Amino acid sequence: MFDDLRQVTITGGLTQVPEMKRTNSGTAVLKLNVGCNQSRKNKQTNEYENTSHYFECSVWGNYAEMMEPKLSKGMKVMVTGDLEFQQWEQDGQKRSKILINAKQVKPLSKNENQGQKLGYGNNQQPNGNNSYDANKNQGSGGNGNFEDDIPF
């Protein structure tokens, strides 16, 4: 009934290179770290103070695989997802954190490294040129009239 109360949306910059991992069953998990800045006016000094907040986000399954090549460190993103509270014990001390299980990740800035990740440079296609080759998309007649092959 109140599941939607755990849903959050944040905007910020990716502070690290997104890291793809796999669970024991093979499910893809993309780990994102999003940093957000907040500016507040100090009432005592009348000066603005900046504070940074960092959020750990997880993207799961096929969506993680689809998003991984589209994201890079420094990009601005909007992440929407559900909050998850985790607890564990480390060196005799109880620890906890809240992370975001992302349902949607929307890039808000351009991925400067996307071409390099795919092995292309200067917006080139895999064949090494930037242009559309109409001859490669000809219909079975070879005359460039490929509309006859469209089934609708």
Image (tube, rainbow, N blue to C red):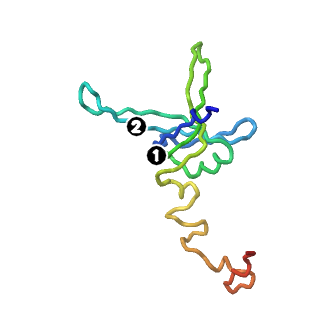
Q: Residue at x 72, y 80 (%)?
A: 139
SS class, disc 1: loop
Q: Which quarter of the figure has residue 151?
A: bottom right
Q: Residue at x 62, y 79 (%)?
A: 134
- Residue 41 in percent (x, y) is at 29, 32
- Residue 116 in percent (x, y) is at 53, 56
Q: Decide: few, some or many residues near mark 2? Use Cα within 10 Å; few <14, some 14-19, many ≥20.
A: few
Question: Does 116 appear above or below 79?
Answer: below
Q: Which quarter of the figure has residue 83?
A: top right
SS class, disc 2: strand
Residue 145 — which label? none
- Residue 103 in percent (x, y) is at 61, 43
Residue 74 — which label? 1
The mark nearer the N terminus, 1 or 2, is 2
Residue 37 — which label? 2
Q: Given contact means CB atoms under 8 Å apart, are the residues at marks 1 and 2 in contact? A: no
Furthest-left residue in this view: 45
- Residue 32 in percent (x, y) is at 55, 40
Of residue 126 and residue 138, the one placed in the foreground of this image is 138
| Left or right, residue 8 beside residue 48 | right
Using the numbered discs, state the Cα–Cα distance from disc 1 to disc 2 in whole angstroms: 14 Å
Furthest-front residue in this view: 1
Of residue 140 and residue 8, the one placed in the foreground of this image is 8
Furthest-bottom residue in this view: 143
Q: Decide: few, some or many residues near mark 1? Use Cα within 10 Å; few <14, some 14-19, many ≥20.
A: some
Q: Which quadrant holds the C terminus?
A: bottom right
Residue type at tag 2:
Asn
| Left or right, residue 135 beside residue 115 | right
Q: Residue at x 29, y 28 (%)?
A: 42
Q: Residue at x 58, y 45 (%)?
A: 104
Residue type at tag 1:
Gly
